Every structure is written in structure tokens, then in C-alpha cells.
């Protein structure tokens, strides 16, 4: 719990005014009293009611609004809450917020404070919070779908299943250790059952580790355009993103540094990178640095579009492009393409989307952040260590460490600094 958690907080939770409606949320022990002060009454729980709001300081009218009274703990924050659905003008919102701020025990919420209270009171776990953060930032449909699944607790429910399995396995291990000389051991094959249970759980965790990366989903599939100078990389980049993002010139070495351009194509986020032309003898030190950065971009690429000779493919899975087909006589291997005339561009986009689909979560799937992947990896490590030994004492200890990894995964242990960073990125009123 943080300092100030006993305060009642309020904030505008809808879009910035002016707007048709402005929703002001109040959460905390004084929420009911705040409603009573503004509307002179409290409506029945979870029933919308129209009322004239008045400033308690001088009884002057503020606005006619819909009221909602939401008693805890069955609310998003786990506390008593009230909502004021006012007219969305700037002056209306400012007047109502000023009246709330003048009430004893009430203060404006900080960024992410509503969600942080929901987390602190067990209404959301850390994974659902991260999913909500991604949902608020989603710009493509694939980002929205994956974030919503995480925010709705699909991954959290899977973790709950892992925790129950671990508790059962730990109980069996402790029983085998404590009562191995007694007659009431559950059964003689308990060690085999423990081993089989750990193996099944480890397999399920390994499947989750193979899930797509949330960073790739959020930042975009990294597509690197590479090849020798004057191969048409910059022209192709501009054609793919639909604007003049890179300078196009017949002068070799025009592109000196990486140019990164995000673009959404067919609901999928891509990050296209134009690179310096690759050649063995750079014209000067600046071009040499650009070539080094181009090679680094190739190492980090999810997809490579290679506009050079087939014999020089940097990776077996690179897509070979026979670019500038409007200038050549044809016959070159690869996807025939002219960024100037548009020939082959649609086919390339279809190929990119198909390749991206194998790198991103599918319909009904979610993706893991680096933090989540790290904790799931720790869980898997402890399960594998338990599988690798016949010593029940070691098995029991590894299962305990596995449970600790799950506590860190859900935010029940060792996450305070990370929480401060996470919630500070939320908007006010969320």
C-alpha cells in the first residue's frame, strides 16, 4: 500500500473536454459523502439517477448529471466508488472538480492510481494491469486483441492453474518426505506421480515460453531492407509505407544511417528499416559506420528484404527481391518488383503479412512481455531442475522456488520499483 491510499481520489476518466459527456470518478471511503454533498442524496446502488449538482460551499448549481453509486468491494478499485456523468464542457468539468477538491479527505488522483488501487486490493493481478496498459496504447487490431485477452485475465487464469498444480505437487512431495516411514503415505507410487506431474506442468510452461513476443507486437515486426548501393531500397521503403520517408537519389551512398519508419498494414504493425548500401569498400568513415549499423540491423531483423544478388543472401529466410524491374530486362531470381510502377508491391505486402502472421499471436492468443517471459523462464528452470533429480528434498525446494517465481509473475512479490514505473505511464483517471 502507498502513502495516501486512505484518501478518496477523483479524476476525469473520459476524454478531454469539450465532449458530449464527461465521466468523473470518485473512489474511496468518502465517495458516498461526496455524492451526498453534491446531489443532496445517494441513489440506489448501481442505478443511474438524474440530479442537479450543487456546490456545497455556496449551494450554487454546477450541472445536471447522471449519478452512479457503486459500493465496494465489488468495484474496479475494490473501494466505494461514485461516477458523475456530466455535460462535457470545460467549465462544467472544472467546476465539479473544484467542488470535489474542496471537500475534506478528497484529492485529485495521480496517474494510474485507480488501477493501482485495483491491483493493491486484488481486483487485478500484474499481468492484467500490463494488458490494460497495452490496451490503452493499442494502435492496431492485432495489438488490441492480444492486449484485451491479457487485460481480461486469460493469462492470469492459466497461471492460477499452474499455481494449483504446484501446490498439489508440493503437498505430495512433503507427504512423501514426512511420512515415508508411516503407513498412511497416499500411495507407493507417489514419487512417480510427482515426476509425471512436474513433467506435464513443465511442458505447458514451455509451450507458453514459445508464445510470441509482446514487444514485437507493440513495436512492430522488424522488416529490414538491405542490399548494395542503388538497389532501390529507399524507393521500396517509400512505396511500402505510402509516403516519402527516405531520400531517393541515384547517387551511391545517399542513405548513410538506418531510417526506421513504423507503419500499420492490414491491422499489423511493422517497423521498416532502410539501411546503407552494403559494399566492401566504403567511400568514407561515415559510410563505413552506416554499413556497420546496417549489418547490426540485419542481425536484429524479423524479416529481411534482400535487394542484392541471390548468392549474397544474408540469411536463408531472407526474401529475395528482384527490384527495379522497370529498368531491367528480367530473368533475375526473386520477387519481380518495381516500386516506381507498383508492379509486385501488392504481392510483397501479402508475403509480409503472411510472414508476420507466423511471428505474432493468432486470434485468441496473447503475447508475453520481457518481464513475463523472464519469470516464466525462471518457473521453467525450477521445474526442469526438479525433474532432473531423484532427491525429494531438492524436488520440494525447487517446487517452492517455482511458487516464488509465480508470485513474482503475478506481482505478489518483489515488484515495487517496477510498479512505480508501470503506473506512472497510465493516464490520469485510469
Image (cartoon, grey):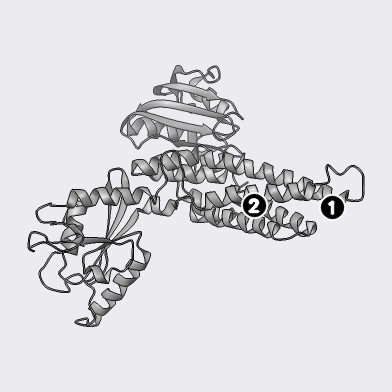
**Quadrant of residue 317 in the image?**
bottom left
* Residue lying at the far right of the rendered structure: 182
State the residue position of label 2.
413
Q: Tell me the element at label 1.
A: helix
The secondary element bearing badge 2 is classed as: loop
Seen at 62% across and 39% down, the residue is 121
Above or below: residue 410 compared with residue 61: below
In front: label 2 or label 1: 1
The x and y percentages for residue 343 are: 13, 52
Label ID, residue 177: 1
Q: Where is residue 265 in the image (x, y as percent from the top left)?
A: 27, 46
Q: Which residue is drawn at 12% across and 51% down?
A: 342
User: How many residues crowd mark 1 within 10 Å: few (<14), some (14–19), many (20+)?
Assistant: some
Rendered location of residue 243, percent (x, y) = 17, 53
Please state if 137 lies on the left or on the right of 398 as rendered. left
Which quadrant of the view contains residue 329? bottom left
Is 214 above or below relative to 151?
below
- Mark 2 or mark 1, which has the lower sequence index? 1
Res. 339 visible in picture = yes
Q: In the figure, is residue 391 to the left or right of 113?
A: right
Q: Marks 2 and 1, Cα distance to the nearest angstrom?
A: 28 Å
Amino acid at each position: 500500500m502507498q502513502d495516501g491510499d486512505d484518501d478518496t481520489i477523483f479524476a476525469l476518466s473520459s476524454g478531454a473536454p469539450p465532449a458530449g459527456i464527461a465521466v468523473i470518478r470518485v473512489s474511496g471511503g468518502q465517495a458516498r459523502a461526496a455524492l451526498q454533498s453534491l446531489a443532496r442524496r445517494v441513489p440506489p446502488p448501481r442505478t443511474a439517477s438524474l440530479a442537479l449538482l450543487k456546490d456545497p460551499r455556496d449551494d450554487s448549481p454546477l450541472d445536471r448529471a447522471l449519478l452512479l453509486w457503486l459500493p465496494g468491494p465489488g468495484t474496479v478499485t475494490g473501494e466505494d466508488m461514485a461516477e458523475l456523468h456530466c455535460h462535457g464542457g470545460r467549465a462544467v468539468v472544472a467546476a465539479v472538480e473544484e467542488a470535489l477538491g474542496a471537500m475534506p479527505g478528497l484529492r485529485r488522483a495521480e496517474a494510474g492510481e485507480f488501477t493501482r488501487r485495483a491491483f493493491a486490493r486484488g481486483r487485478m493481478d500484474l499481468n492484467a494491469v500490463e494488458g490494460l496498459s497495452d490496451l490503452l496504447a493499442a494502435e492496431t487490431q492485432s495489438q488490441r486483441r492480444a492486449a484485451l485477452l491479457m487485460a481480461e485475465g486469460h493469462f492470469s487464469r492459466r497461471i492460477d492453474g499452474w499455481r494449483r498444480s504446484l501446490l498439489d505437487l508440493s503437498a505430495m512431495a512433503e507427504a512423501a518426505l514426512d511420512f515415508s516411514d508411516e503407513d498412511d503415505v497416499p500411495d507407493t507410487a507417489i514419487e512417480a506421480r510427482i515426476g509425471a506431474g512436474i513433467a506435464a506442468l513443465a511442458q505447458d510452461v514451455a509451450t507458453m515460453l514459445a508464445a510470441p513476443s509482446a514487444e514485437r507486437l507493440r513495436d512492430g515486426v522488424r522488416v529490414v531492407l538491405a542490399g548494395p548501393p542503388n538497389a532501390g531500397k529507399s524507393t521500396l521503403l517509400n512505396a511500402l509505407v505510402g509516403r516519402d520517408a527516405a531520400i531517393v537519389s541515384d547517387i551511391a551512398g545517399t542513405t548513410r544511417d538506418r531510417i526506421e519508419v513504423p507503419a500499420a498494414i492490414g491491422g499489423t504493425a511493422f517497423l521498416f528499416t532502410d539501411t546503407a548500401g552494403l559494399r566492401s569498400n566504403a567511400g568514407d568513415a561515415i559510410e563505413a559506420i552506416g554499413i556497420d549499423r546496417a549489418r547490426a540491423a540485419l542481425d536484429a531483423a524479423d524479416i529481411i528484404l534482400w535487394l542484392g544478388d541471390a548468392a549474397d543472401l544474408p540469411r536463408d529466410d531472407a526474401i529475395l527481391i528482384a527490384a527495379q524491374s522497370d529498368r531491367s530486362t528480367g530473368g533475375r531470381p526473386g520477387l519481380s518488383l518495381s516500386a516506381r510502377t507498383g508492379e509486385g508491391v501488392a504481392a510483397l505486402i501479402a508475403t509480409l503479412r503472411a510472414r508476420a502472421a507466423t511471428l505474432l499471436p493468432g486470434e485468441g492468443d496473447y503475447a508475453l512481455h520481457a518481464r513475463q517471459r523472464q519469470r516464466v523462464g525462471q518457473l521453467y528452470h525450477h521445474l526442469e531442475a526438479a525433474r532432473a533429480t531423484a532427491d525429494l528434498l531438492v524436488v520440494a525446494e525447487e517446487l517452492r522456488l517455482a511458487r516464488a517465481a509465480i508470485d513474482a509473475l503475478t506481482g505478489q512479490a518483489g515488484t515495487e520499483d517496477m510498479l512505480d514505473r508501470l503506473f506512472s505511464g497510465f493516464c490520469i483517471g485510469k
